[in-house]
Amino acid sequence: MFQSWERRRACINVMGYGGRVSDTGGGKFSEALKQTIKSIEAKLRTELVEGKFFDRLEGERRTFQELMQKFMKEHASKVSENTRVLYGASLKHLSGFFGDMVLFEISSKKITDYKQARKESSGGVPSINRSLSMLSKAFSLCVKEWEWVKENPVLKVSREKENSGRDRWLTGEDEKRLLDNSPQWLKEIILFDLHTGLRQDELLSLQWSRVDLFRKTSSYKRQRTGNPGRCH
C-alpha cells in the first residue's frame, strides 16, 4: 500500500501513459507489462473510489470485545447498579455469540442470526430484547461519539414481539423499581427469572440435579404442557 497521496498520484500518472512509457533502457514496455500496468491502474482507481487509500474507520480493526469494554467503562459506569447488573447478564449472552468478531463483520444479518440462536436456545423474549437494546446503545455511541463505525446495524433488526395478552412483561422501569425495593437475597432470584422467562412454578421446581454447570443450562418441566424445557 502506498504511504502518501503524492506518491499514489505520481504512480497513477505514470500508469496513465500505458505503452508510451519507456523503460530505463530506452525501450518500450512489452505488451504483457502494459497489460499488467493497466490492471494495476484499474485496481488503484477502484480502491481510490472506494476510499481504501484514505483513513480507515476504527471499526475495521476494533473487535466486539473492545466495544463492550469501552461501553462498560464509559457508559455503564454512569447508570444505576441494577442496570449494570442487567448489562452484565446481557453481555454474557452477546459475548458468547459475537466473541472477538471485528465490528465491520457485525451486520444486521449477523444480529438476526444471534436473535434466532437465542430463540432456539429457549432464551426469554424480554431477555433477547434487552440484549438487542444494549447492543444498539453501544453501536449508537460507536457512531455518534467514538466514530468507530458509520451506522448502527441493530436499527435494522426488529425486536421480538412481547406477549401483550394475559402475560404481562415488566418494562425496564418496572424491573428497576422491583429490584430497588427487594432484599438482597431475593435480587438474584429475580434477575435469574428475568433472564430465563420461567414461570413461578417452573422456577420453584428447579433442582440441582437438573443443573449442567458445564453447559450452563438447567432442565425443567414446562408449566403449560408438562414437556421438558431447558434454560440458559
Image: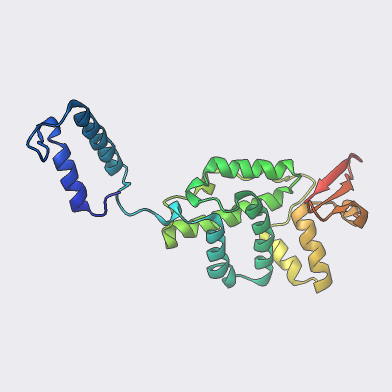
Q: Nearer the viewer, residue 186 or 67?
A: 67
Residue drawn at point x = 60 percent, y = 53 percent: 99
Q: Quadrant of residue 23?
A: top left
Furthest residue to the left? 26
Can you give x and y, in whole percent of width and height, for residue 206 in the image? 90, 54
Can you give x and y, in whole percent of width and height, for residue 52 in the image? 33, 46
As drawn, 189 above or below 127: below
| Residue 142 seen in the figure | yes
Furthest residue to the top? 31
As drawn, 166 above or below 139: above
Query: Is residue 181 rendered to the left or right of residue 211?
Result: left
Tally of marks: 0
Residue drawn at point x = 32 percent, y = 42 percent: 50
Can you give x and y, in whole percent of width and height, for residue 110 in the image? 57, 42
Q: Quadrant of residue 77?
A: bottom right
Q: Nearer the viewer, residue 217 or 126?
A: 217
Q: Quadrant of residue 211?
A: bottom right
Can you give x and y, in whole percent of width and height, for residue 42 in the image? 25, 34
Residue drawn at point x = 54 percent, y = 58 percent: 137
Q: Nearer the viewer, residue 192 or 178?
A: 192
Residue drawn at point x = 64 percent, y = 49 percent: 97
